[in-house]
Amino acid sequence: MEFIVEEGKHLNNDCSTLVLPALSIGNVGQLAVDLLISSTRAERIGYLDDPYVLPCVGNDAYGPIPRGEVALPLEAYDSSLNKLTLVQQRSPVLKGMMVEFAKNLAYFAADSGKKHVIVLSSLDFGQWQRIDMSSGSQIYYISSANMDGADDDCEKLGWKKLHEYNPAQRRWKYLSTLAAGNAMQEDGLAFEDELEDEEDYYPSLPFAALLSCFKAKGLKVTCLLCYCSEGDNIPDAFNLADAACKLLELSPQNFHGDQGGNWAIPFSWKTVYGPPPDMSLF
């Protein structure tokens, strides 16, 4: 993976936290990162070129008036005010290459001095076995703070550790071995298809590869997860982005939304989805 810095830009050494999406159902992680980039007015500082990400190109997603600025598959943004770097991923990874892609991202994060990585992703509602809607849409997490994935900071925020996370389970152990470079991927344990058991679903997802590879590089990593279905996933994106802000202790007063410190809706959302939802709910 190569990092190409835009002319006159540079990575801010004070931005020690990295936020990025893991592609999954409904693209909720990507939508949440869009919200964070737009609301913090993060500055694009460059691009990441990786051989395992499918190429794509588009126009500027954040400005109300398209300025002809090319958007590419992997872009890096810095929010100096919030000491935050964000990476947006706009196209999927080649089938079978997710672990290699995750390794490359982990090298980038470590080499650029990141200390904490926050991965935002969604889970298939059809896999939700312990349904409890008493508190509305829920956030689940997995953290590298402890071997079992638990984290006191996340618990204090009222989130639940993903119950299905079991680092001793066969696929999780194998994924950790791959991330550490101590094994070659075998066809019999491909992560993207041919799942034998329900417990294989979670380690087959992109967030699992990212979690394992960031851990292998010695970085603290927190995965924030929410269950959803395909459809209008804007509320899920607000919920996930709000969770990231709580974990980062970001104040909405540092945001530059149209309603005095609220979320700034990316312009590309307005053209696709129309007016934003009632943001007072989040």
Image: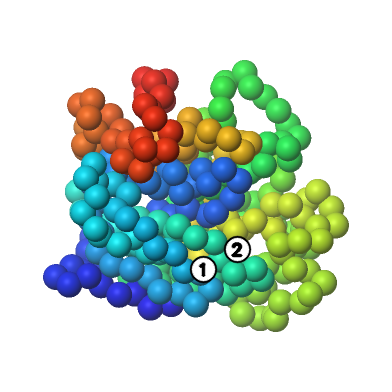
User: Which residue is painted at 65% across and 56% down in the image?
Assistant: 205
* Circle 2 residue: 209
**Residue 276 x, y percent position in the rendering:** 38, 28
Judge whether residue 252 can be spotted in this image. no
Residue 212: name its quadrant. Answer: bottom right
**Residue 221 x, y percent position in the rendering:** 49, 56
* Circle 1 residue: 54
User: Which residue is painted at 43% across and 43% down in the image?
Assistant: 32
Q: Secondary structure at mark 1?
A: loop
Q: Secondary structure at mark 2?
A: helix
User: Which residue is painted at 71% across and 28% down in the image?
Assistant: 131
User: Along the polypeptide, which appears first: circle 1 or circle 2?
Assistant: 1
Q: Which mark is residue 101?
A: none
Q: CA distance from mark 1 to mark 2?
A: 18 Å
Residue sitting at the far right: 196
**Residue 156 x, y percent position in the rendering:** 48, 33
Residue sitting at the far left: 8
